[in-house]
Amino acid sequence: MDTASPDLQLYTMAHAARKQAATTRHRPTPPPQTKPAEPAWQAVSPTQIRGQRAEITAAHWLQQQKLTILSTNLRCKFGEIDIVAKENDVLVFIEVRSRSYAGFGGAAASINHVKQQRIIRTAQYHLLPLARRFFSNKVPPCRFDVVTLEQDGLKWYRAAFSMRQ
């Protein structure tokens, strides 16, 4: 026969609940994962691998043409610029295109007006930091070039498009 008062039983249950809550609050956090999950943007498709190879090939070729590579794959919310180079006192933004099939106009034709505007906006976004870093804080003249790699070889289109169109 249980002779404990209902108040004592209620107190005992409340005390046990508080004790459980206290141990839950002070439970140590688990250690961080030793290997973080790989972000989705690092997944590389065969097309991206071909594009990276084309950019590397173009960068090496441009260096042989006496351009100084300042940066590659400049990204911002507006887009990406494949190669940023310096030729004498001119800042050159270079888009690299590669096509294994020359149909639909080939690699050069794939840089339509929308793509050009995206490249221009990205260049404007990065222009001041590049000028600060490589041109003693003076905004240099800029040029937009295109390098295409197709079955018939590499072609360099100097001043392929401009900001004023």
Image: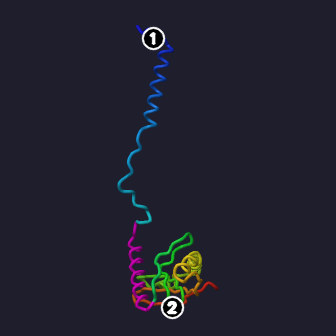
Which quadrant of the view contains residue 61?
bottom left
Q: Residue furthest front?
A: 136
Tag 1: Cα neighbours inside 10 Å, few (<14), some, or many (≥20)?
Answer: few
Q: Residue at x 55, y 78 (%)?
A: 132
Task: Residue 10: give x, y in percent of width and height.
Answer: 49, 18
Q: Amino acid at mark 2?
A: Asn
The quadrant in which the C terminus is found is: bottom right
Highlighted range, magenta = 43-66
User: Residue 102 location, x and y as percent?
Assistant: 44, 85
Q: Which residue is mark 2?
A: 88
Above or below, 18 against 61 in this view is above
Q: At 40% from the left edge and 41% from the top edge, which residue is drawn?
A: 28
Q: Tag 1, which secondary structure? A: loop
Q: Return the residue at label 1.
A: 4
Task: Specify the amino acid type for callout 1.
Answer: Ala
Residue 133 visible in the displayed image: yes
Q: Is residue 54 magenta?
A: yes
Pointer 2 or 1: first along the chain: 1
